Image: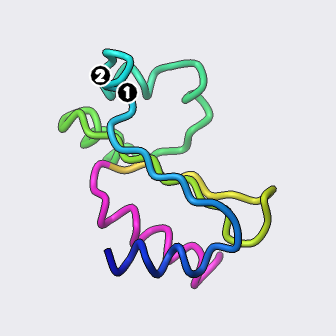
Amino acid sequence: MDKLTKLLALCKCSLLLMVNNHRDYYESAEQRLNSPEALDWDIPDDIRAKIIETDTLIELVFHPDTPIGLYHILHYDLDAALDEALEAILHPS
């Protein structure tokens, strides 16, 4: 919870965390990743493979500065997704 609490404190706008939302639609994670809306998601091959293998899809969408700019992180591991989010805010590239 410490990482989530820290991320919430750093975001001036909203944060949305969805875990396995694909299951609400009787889909597999692989089906979700192959859906039309997911076509523009940039997911590293190793992360994508693990999402499919574990059928676990974590989606973290957050607006650190304004309602317009956002990050969309996809992962199979919540802790790693939070690490990636904190890294994006604290050390932007």
For image coordinates 70% across by 73% down, the residue present is 12
Mark 2: amino acid? Ser
Secondary structure, mark 1, is: helix
- Residue that numbered label 1 is attached to: 22
For image coordinates 64% across by 60% down, the residue present is 14
Q: Is residue 34 left or right of residue 27?
A: right
- Residue that numbered label 2 is attached to: 28
Q: Is residue 86 above or below residue 75?
A: below
Mark closer to the chain start, 1 or 2: 1
Q: Is residue 19 left or right of residue 74?
A: left
Q: Position of residue 66 (x, y in %)?
A: 79, 66
Quarter of the image where one finds residue 49 = top left
Which colouring convention does the figure follow? Answer: rainbow
Q: Is residue 39 left or right of residue 76?
A: right
Q: Is residue 36 above or below residue 84?
A: above
| In-front residue for pair 11/52 | 11
Q: Position of residue 56 (x, y in %)?
A: 26, 39
In reply to whether residue 32 is colored magenta, the answer given is no
Question: Extreme left residue here?
Answer: 54
For image coordinates 56% across by 53% down, the residue present is 61
Secondary structure, mark 2, is: loop
Q: Position of residue 68 (x, y in %)?
A: 81, 56
Q: Position of residue 62 (x, y in %)?
A: 60, 60
In the image, which residues are magenta? 76-93
Quarter of the image where one finds residue 90 = bottom right
